[in-house]
Amino acid sequence: MIKENTQAPSFKLLSTNNYEYSLKDSLGKYVVIYFYPKDDTPGCSIEARDFNKLLPKFKRLNCEVFGVSKDSLKSHDKFKDKYKIKFDLLSDQDLKILKKYKVWAKKKFMGREFMGILRTTFLIDNKGKIIKIWKNVKVKDHAKEVLNKLNTIVKFKKAPKGL
């Protein structure tokens, strides 16, 4: 099981920027990685738009944001274009990273069981350690909650020692 205060599992995934993104590329910065079920569905669209709206504030705190699903890059590109998303979406069609982060699991909907992505967000520090995990995310105000947590952490680290 992945826990807070442990090293984030490393990975490489294809990105909408037409390159292979590696978590190691973000060492020295904070990173938000949010896993979502499917491009252009109601909840996923709200979540992406909310992170997009707050992106300048995340960047001011030296933080990158990435969305991950099993959708193809072609699907991600259409989703990004439709909502003018300014951060990269990562494609995990073979489910390797979804399984590594333990977000690919059995779900229930209207009495039916199926395998799918558990909406989960990871906040990772500038050394690659998981600071906070949000499981079973409700999208309303979630991006704001993540930003508030990051703000608290950054302010705490900047506070003078010995007070």
Image (cartoon, rainbow, N blue to C red):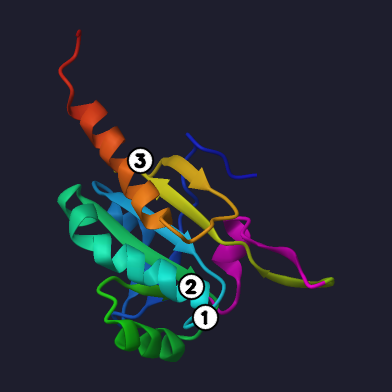
Q: In this rendered view, identify the residue nearer to me: 49 or 9.
A: 49
Whole-percent x and y of residue 79? 39, 85
| Residue type of the residue flagged with mark 2 | Cys
| Residue type of the residue flagged with mark 1 | Thr
Residue corresponding to mark 1: 41
Q: Quick one: SS at disc 1?
A: loop
> From mark 1 to mark 3, how far is it between C-alphas?
26 Å
Taking the spot 59% from the left edge, 44% from the top edge, the residue there is 2
Q: Please identify the quadrant where the N terminus is shown.
A: top right
Q: Residue furthest right?
A: 111
User: Is residue 104 found inside the magenta-colored segment of the image?
Assistant: yes
Residue 1 visible in the shown view: yes
Q: In this rendered view, identify the residue nearer to me: 56 or 98.
A: 56
Q: Please identify the quadrant where the C terminus is shown.
A: top left
Residue corresponding to mark 2: 44
Taking the spot 32% from the left edge, 82% from the top edge, the residue there is 83
**Quadrant of res 107:** bottom right
Residue corresponding to mark 3: 149
